[in-house]
Image: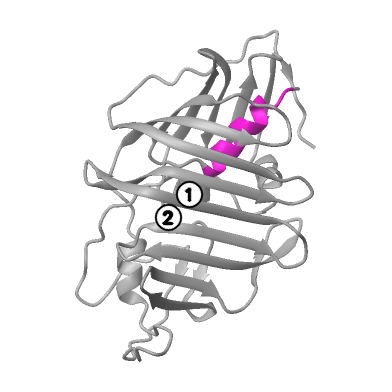
């Protein structure tokens, strides 16, 4: 099998269509979902100390943007150790329902895929193969173990996709913006295994996400995602450029340039020809 399905699945996890609306401030409270655990710490901040009251920060970075669908056209460059030409990607997100992606090389469609709450599907049109799996395969590609549809959609719409406990993360501010770093190793448990990560997130002064770094403390595995050239389009903050580095037994790098954003609906055809061979995920 060629690299197209792998490229497709990597893009599902870390493509650059992260979005963020400006947060609406509330008087005394903030709606926090299961990603964040915010403790009641209202102590005043000492300018020389880490920020103790994280509520104003979370008010900006937690709220989900309001949209029904987003279409993104991107130029994709992938480095895996094997030659892969520059790809043209069309990414379509229908909120809470599906993420659809189409990849072209030299104007020819080489791969297509779809993610839903039930799992992920992908097909390589050059080798006539396809996959139909849960999110385990995607986690293995990224050297992590916490990606499901909910966290995938949070990645794609610019929200923190790992659980952040207020007491286990330190928030500081500098001239570049904000830094939130785990002060204890973050244990992420699934049915099969437990992994521990050091996690660092950086935001600029406008609360745009600049960088996310997850480092497995017991292995060389590391995921690093950087964002730049943020713009506001239709009231939603979007990055034009993303750089993804995946380190482990094998390392990969993905560079994305978002060239166009569209908020209209589009058809998302997906069917597998009967002649295609299914790739079993182990």
Q: Say if residue 111 shows up in the picture.
A: yes
The residue labelled by disc 1 is 155
Q: Are marks 2 and 1 in contact (CB under 8 Å)?
A: yes
- Using the image as rendered, state which of residue 170 and residue 204 is in the foreground: 204
Residue 96 position within the rendered picture, expressed as x and y whole percent measured from the top left: 41, 41
In the image, residue 79 lies in the stretch drawn in magenta: no
Q: Nearer the viewer, residue 128 or 179?
A: 179
Residue 238 percent location from the top left of the image: 34, 45
Pointer 2 local density, CA inside 10 Å: few below 14, some 14–19, many at least 20: many
Q: Does the segment drawn in magenta span residue 13?
A: yes
- Which quarter of the image is occupied by the N terminus? top right
Taking the spot 52% from the left edge, 59% from the top edge, the residue there is 212
Q: Is residue 118 visible?
A: no
Q: Which residues are magenta?
A: 2-14
- What residue would you read off at disc 2? 159
Q: Is residue 109 above or below residue 249?
A: above
Q: Quadrant of residue 186?
A: bottom right
């Amino acid at each position: 099998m060629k690299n197209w399905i792998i490229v497709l699945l990597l893009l599902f996890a870390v493509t650059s269509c992260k979005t963020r609306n400006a947060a609406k401030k509330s008087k005394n409270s903030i709606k926090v979902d299961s990603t964040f655990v915010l403790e009641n710490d209202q102590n005043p901040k000492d300018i020389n100390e880490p920020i103790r009251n994280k509520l104003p920060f979370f008010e900006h970075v937690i709220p989900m943007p309001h949209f029904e669908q987003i279409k993104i056209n991107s130029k994709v460059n992938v480095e895996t150790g094997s030659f892969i030409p520059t790809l043209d990607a069309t990414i379509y997100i229908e909120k809470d329902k599906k993420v659809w992606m189409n990849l072209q090389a030299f104007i020819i469609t080489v791969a297509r895929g779809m993610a839903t709450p039930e799992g992920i599907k992908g097909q390589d049109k050059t080798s006539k193969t396809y996959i139909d799996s849960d999110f385990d395969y995607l986690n293995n590609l990224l050297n992590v173990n916490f990606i499901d549809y909910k966290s995938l959609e949070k990645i794609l719409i610019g929200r923190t996709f790992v659980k952040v406990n207020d007491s286990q993360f330190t928030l500081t501010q500098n001239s570049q913006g904000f830094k939130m770093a785990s002060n204890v190793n973050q244990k992420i448990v699934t049915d099969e295994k437990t992994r521990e990560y050091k996690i660092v997130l950086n935001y600029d002064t406008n609360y745009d996400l600049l960088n996310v770094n997850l480092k497995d403390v017991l292995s060389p595995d590391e995921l690093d995602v950087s964002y730049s050239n943020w713009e506001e389009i239709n009231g939603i903050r979007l990055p034009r450029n993303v750089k993804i580095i995946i380190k482990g037994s094998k390392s990969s790098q993905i560079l994305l340039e978002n060239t166009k954003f569209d908020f209209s609906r589009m058809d998302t055809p997906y069917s597998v020809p009967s002649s295609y061979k299914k790739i079993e995920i182990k």
